[in-house]
Image (tube, rainbow, N blue to C red):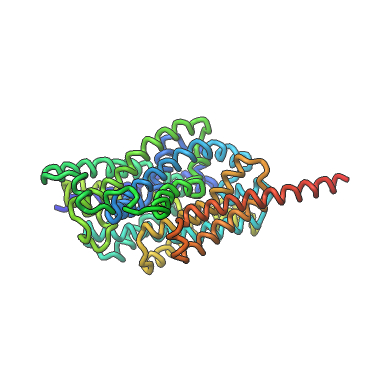
Amino acid sequence: MNYTLIGFILYLICVLAVGLYTYRSNKSHKDFFLAGRRLNPWVVAFSERASGESAWLLLGLPGAAFASGLLELWTAVGCILGIIFYWYIIAKDLRNETEKYDAITLPNFFAEKFSKNDKILRVVSMLIIMFFFTFYLAAQFNGAGKVLNVTFDIPHIYGIIIGAVVIIIYTMMGGFFAVAWTDLIQGIIMICVLVVLPIVGLIELSEQGSSLTSSITAAGSEFSSVIGGATGWAAVAVVIGGLSWGLGYMGQPHLLTRFMAIKDPEKIKTSRKIAIVWAIPAFFGAIMIGLIGLALYGQGHFSDVEKIMPHLTTSLLPAWLAGIFISGAIAAMMSTADSQLLVITSSVIEDFYHQTLGKNVTEKTLLNLSRIITIVVGVAAFVISITSKELIFSLVSYAWAGLGSSFGPALLLMLKWKKTTKQGVLAGMLTGSITTIVWSNIPVLDEFITVRFSSFVLAFIAVIIVSLITSKNNNSSVRQAEV
C-alpha cells in the first residue's frame, strides 16, 4: 500500500472540502475577494505566511542553497527582516486606510486615496499585477509538477494539470474564505516540513559519521563562504542581492490583502507575533534542507537542484510521514497560487470591469463573473507553466522584483509621507515595472547589482521627486482657484 499517495489524496480531499464548505459564505464579490474583513488573527497570520512563501521556499530556496551554499543565508535574513518591517510599519495603517476608502483591492486603494474613481491608477495597477503575477502563478504550477514527478513518478505535465485543477476549483468555489482557511492548514504543514526534515537530515549525517560543517567545508570554499568566495564589489553585491528579497514584501498584493481582511485592526499585534515566529525557523529550515542535500549527495547529483526537498523527504522519512510532507510542498504552491489567482481576478472584476468601466450589475452577477475570470486566468497560467523553461527561483525572483518595486515604494510613502501625490505614485509604479523588465534582460546590470534592489530604489526616488514637483504645482493650482 502506498501510504505517501494516500496521505496526498487525503490532503487534496481536505482542501476541496474547504472550498465546498465556504461556497455559501460568499454573498457578494466583496466576500469573495476579502472575506468581508472578518478573519481572525490566527487565520490572517498563517494565511499571510503560507501565501508569502510559495514553491520558492520549499523547492527554490533549498535548491539555491544546494547549488550555492552558505551565501543563501543572506536571502533568509533579508526575507525575515522584510517580514518584520512590513508587519510593523505597513499592516495596521493599510487595514485602517483601506476600510476608510472602502477599498477591497490594492489598485482600488490607490485610486480612491487621491481622487474618486481614478481610472489611470486603476488600469496601470491592474496591468502590472496581471503581467508579473502570470510568471509567479506559472512558477507555482510548475512546482506542483516537479514534486509529483519526484514523489509518484507522474510525468511533469500531468503533475502541473493536477495542481492547477485543484487550485482553480477551490478558489473558484470558496474565494477568499477558502483561500484563507486552506492557508491555515497549509501553513501548519509547511512549518512542520521546514523544521522536522532538517532535523532528520542532521541525524542521517551523524549516523554516517559526518557533520554538516565538515561536509560543506569539504565541498569547497565557494560553498562554505557566506559571500561565495567573492571579493570586492562582487562580495558586496552578493550581500545586497540576498538582503534585497526583504524589500519585495511591501509590494505583494496577495500578501497585503491579508492585512486588509483582518476583523479587528488591534488584533494585528497577535497576527504579527505568529507570523514572525513562523518565519524564522521556516527560512533557516529551507536553507538547511539545501545544505544537508549538498552534504549527503554532493554537487552534480541532480539535473534539477529544485527537486532536493521532495527527494530528501521520500528518502529519509517513513512513507506515511512523507505523504503528509509532500502535501506540505504542494501546500506551499497552492497557498500562493490561489492567492495570486484571486488577486488577478479581483483586479479584473473590481478595478477594471466594475470601477473603470462603471458596470453596475447585481452582486450575484459580479460574483459569477469573478468565478469565470478565476477559471480563465488559471488556464492562461497553466499554458505558461508548461512552456516555461525557467527555474522556479528565477521566475519568482523576477515577479517579486516587479511587484515589490512597482507597489512597495508607492504604498510605503502613501501611508507615511503626506506629500505623496497621484503623479508620484504613478511614476513609482511605472519606474519599478519598467526597470525590472529592462534590468533583468541586461545581464551585466544584474551582475553588477540585483534588479530586486535597483528597481526598488529607483522607484522610491521616482515617487519622491515627482511628488515634490507635482505637489508644488497642485498647491499653485489650488491658490489660483481660490483667487
Whether residue 353 is visible:
no
Lateral position of residue 236 relative to residue 146, left or right: right
Q: Is residue 358 found left or right of 156 in the rendered image?
A: right
Whether 1 is drawn above or below 158: the answer is above
Q: Quadrant of residue 434?
A: bottom right
Give the quarter of the image for residue 148: bottom left
Of residues 66 and 411, the one drawn nearer to the viewer in this rendering? 66
Of residue 436 and residue 74, the one placed in the foreground of this image is 74
Q: Position of residue 414 (x, y in %)?
A: 61, 44
Depth check: 259 or 231 in front?
231
For the view shown, which residue lies furthest in the bottom direction?
387
* Relative height, residue 444 to residue 99 (above, below): below
Q: Quadrant of the C terminus?
A: top right
- Residue 382 vs residue 322: left or right? right
Question: Residue placed farthest to the front in the image?
Answer: 232
Q: Nearer the viewer, residue 234 or 103?
A: 234
Picture coordinates of residue 400, whole percent (x, y) = 46, 54
Side (left or right) of 207 relative to 132: left
Can you give x and y, in whole percent of width and height, for residue 359 in the image?
64, 57
Q: Residue at x 60, y 47 (%)?
A: 109
Image x and y of residue 426, in percent: 63, 54
Q: How many marks?
A: 0
Q: Is residue 196 visible?
A: yes
